[in-house]
Image (cartoon, rainbow, N blue to C red):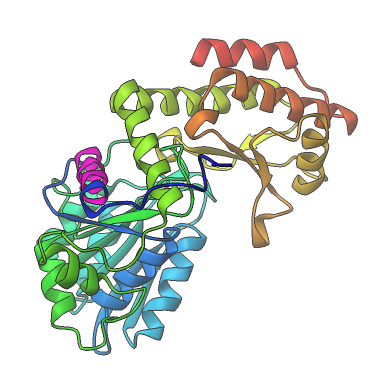
Amino acid sequence: MTHPLLDLAPLTASRFASIERRVAALLGTGQDVVIMQGEALLPLEGCIRGGARAGSTALNVVTGPYGQTFGDWLRDCGARVVDLDVPFHTAVTAGQVEEALAAHPEIDFVSLVHAEAATGNTNPVAEIGEVVRAHGALFMLDAVASVGAEPLLPDAWGVDLCVIGAQKAMGGPAGVSAVSVSERAWERMAANPAAPRRSYLSLMDWKERWIDGGRRALLHAPAQLEMLALEACVERIEAEGLDAVMARHASAAAATRAGALALGGGLTPYVHEVKDAAPVATTLRAPDGLDARDLVAAALAADPSLPLIAGGGALAKEMIRVNHYGVDAARGVVQSSLAALGGALAEQGRQVDLEGARRAVGENW
């Protein structure tokens, strides 16, 4: 008995290359695009280990937990790391980056997260890219959460290594990711004797054996189901239109923020300024005296399918995250999420305005 998910013909090199081209078109890039066979942490670590080395000085912008991880990897590579720590309730500015670069002219690598789904902020990459380009450092961007949700123009913004994943706004699988690589980045990695080679982390292997070989022979058997799912979600974005997908995410963010403020009960936006708020997730500060984990658990007891989660690590007690990316960037999902949170708050004796929240969602969609 055949099974549509199990009895699949092997993925050919030409099919793999066609998916690669469609991902490049989604990014609007003329740079090489490498599709990596794993979650986005794979190319992110590969970019850092290829682009940084002993003797490097890296500026690592920390606006959330992923920035902290990048700093650990950079230090492990032997690089000297200058951490630019920014409160998680805001975004970094190009001015702050420029000051750090001026104070440390030896910086030759900059790492930044575009949108931090974990903290709900987003950073002004276009302005930062201009500053980094003027300084001459290699620029790596984690755009896993931003791709498909807000403008992302790696070529125009001077991004040398732009990493994306399919599992958030693209509405695809978590097991496949991609990175666009500039010519400068390839040159840096080729000159780095410590860059991974003959390794699953190696971008150079894909360059030398796949790209330079004319994309005729794959390095290994690709993650077939994930590749086909990536192709399907790119097709879905193409059919809806990238601008429409981004507009849907912007509407979800605006409606969630407005609805949460109208709901009351002591909920407040975790990210202070609207301009700094990411379109993929709205983070809320739990009311004083209440544990975010308990509120989320009570809300999910009413509907386990809702995209609600408590903050991670030190933020677990105080942060509630409303994810509204991919198929969850929908008015009904936002309304249901806020209604469930309102019910959980009411159970704790907090006064909430469910109708006001519903109205605010509709008015701001």
Please report the residue visible at 26 percent of the width from the left and 76 percent of the height from the top. 50
Residue 44 in percent (x, y) is at: 36, 65
Q: Is residue 294 left or right of residue 279?
A: right
Residue 103 in percent (x, y) is at: 24, 74
Q: Is residue 67 left or right of residue 50?
A: right
Please report the residue visible at 34 percent of the width from the left and 21 percent of the height from the top. 240
Q: Is residue 145 above or below residue 66?
A: above
* Residue 105 vs residue 206, the one in the foreground: 206
Main secondary structure along the magenta-highlighted residues: helix
* Residue 105 vs residue 153, the one in the foreground: 153
Please report the residue visible at 26 percent of the width from the left and 81 percent of the height from the top. 195
Which quadrant of the figure contains the N terminus? top right
* Residue 152 vs residue 112, the one in the foreground: 152
Residue 85 in percent (x, y) is at: 44, 64
Magenta segment range?
16-27
Q: Quadrant of residue 131?
A: bottom left
Q: Quadrant of residue 77?
A: bottom left
Q: Is residue 210 above or below residue 285?
A: below
Would you say residue 149 is visible in this rendering? no
Q: Is residue 237 left or right of residue 278?
A: left
Q: Is residue 17 magenta?
A: yes
Would you say residue 257 is visible in this rendering? yes
